[in-house]
Image (cartoon, rainbow, N blue to C red):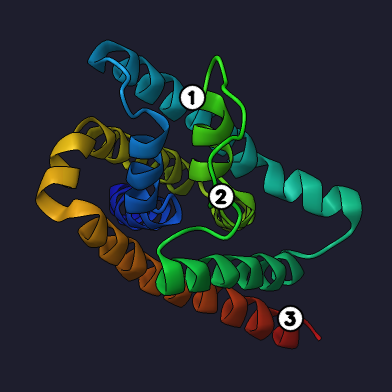
């Protein structure tokens, strides 16, 4: 049981971290909070990560309920979510940005922590589908616990990166952050391919 928990925890942490596209989030955070005091930036990071966690937990458990409600199979959703995730990966690889969250809000917002930082910068359409797929794949209690803890750990790592965003910008520069986003996109494309291939194999096996 412990072995299953730890293996699920480690794999889930890595999966969720790349799903969040941390270096793209850092780039957007720097642009959205330019000129703000450090205390306000800290508050934004905390609220954004909490909002992303709450959304992630809801999606994590919503998969099976949604699939049964609208009458689709997990394999079909794997294929659809994987394709959407692959489009996001292509956008990251080609331009270093996510295709659904490339611009900043036109108007000034009182609170940018939830929108647009948590949604859709951290958790966009492709991430939503992938979280639902991963949540539906975990059945045993140890797996579910490992998956949830992996989600928490990935958000904590992201929060640390956001706190260090100023230093990362100085060390890596905009070009360096863009390159790291592209590397993340490459790994994300492999994850997307795995989801699609698993869905196709499961669909073929079921028929």
**Residue drawn 69% across and 41% down?**
62
Q: Secondary structure at mark 3?
A: helix
Please name the residue that numbered disc 2 is placed on: 101
Residue most toward the left? 171
Q: Secondary structure at mark 2?
A: loop
Which callout, 1 or 3, points to the residue nearer the camera? Answer: 1
Q: Quick check: 167 left or right of 157?
A: left
Numbered badge on residue 133: none
Residue 141 vertical placement versus 79 (above, below): above
Callout 3: few (<14), some (14-19), or many (20+) C-alpha neighbours within 10 Å?
Answer: some
Q: Quick check: 75 left or right of 130?
A: right
**Residue drawn 51% across and 77% down?**
194
Which quadrant: the C terminus?
bottom right
Please name the residue that numbered disc 1 is placed on: 113
- Coordinates of residue 87 in the picture (x, y in percent): 59, 71
- Coordinates of residue 206 in the picture (x, y in percent): 76, 81
CA distance for labels 2 and 3: 32 Å
Callout 2: few (<14), some (14-19), or many (20+) C-alpha neighbours within 10 Å?
Answer: some
> Which comes sooner in the sequence, label 2 or label 3?
2
CA distance for labels 1 and 3: 39 Å
In depth, the one of 194 and 105 nearer the eye is 105
- The answer to whether residue 150 is seen in the rendering is no
> Which comes sooner in the sequence, label 1 or label 2?
2
Q: Secondary structure at mark 1?
A: helix
Q: Quick check: 194 left or right of 133?
A: left
Please name the residue that numbered disc 3 is placed on: 203
**Residue drawn 45% across and 49% down?**
143
**Residue drawn 41% across and 68% down?**
185
> Which comes sooner in the sequence, label 1 or label 3?
1
CA distance for labels 1 and 2: 14 Å
- Coordinates of residue 47 in the picture (x, y in percent): 44, 20
């Amino acid at each position: 049981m412990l072995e299953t928990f730890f293996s699920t925890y480690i794999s889930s942490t890595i999966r969720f971290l790349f799903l969040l596209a941390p270096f793209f989030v850092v780039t957007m955070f720097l642009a959205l909070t330019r000129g703000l005091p450090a205390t306000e930036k800290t508050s934004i990071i905390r609220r954004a990560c909490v909002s992303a966690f709450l959304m992630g937990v809801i999606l994590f458990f919503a998969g099976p309920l949604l699939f049964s409600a609208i009458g689709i199979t997990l394999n079909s959703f794997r294929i659809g979510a994987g394709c959407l995730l692959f489009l996001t990966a292509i956008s990251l690889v080609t331009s270093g940005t996510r295709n659904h969250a490339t611009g900043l809000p036109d108007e000034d917002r009182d609170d940018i922590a939830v929108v647009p930082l948590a949604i859709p910068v951290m958790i966009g359409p492709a991430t939503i589908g992938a979280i639902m797929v991963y949540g539906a794949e975990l059945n045993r209690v140890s797996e579910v616990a490992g998956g949830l803890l992996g989600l928490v750990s990935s958000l904590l790592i992201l929060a640390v990166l956001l706190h260090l965003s100023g230093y990362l910008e100085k060390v890596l520069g905009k070009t360096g952050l863009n390159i790291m986003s592209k590397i993340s996109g490459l790994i994300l494309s492999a994850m997307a391919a795995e989801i699609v291939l698993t869905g196709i194999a499961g669909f073929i096996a079921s028929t």
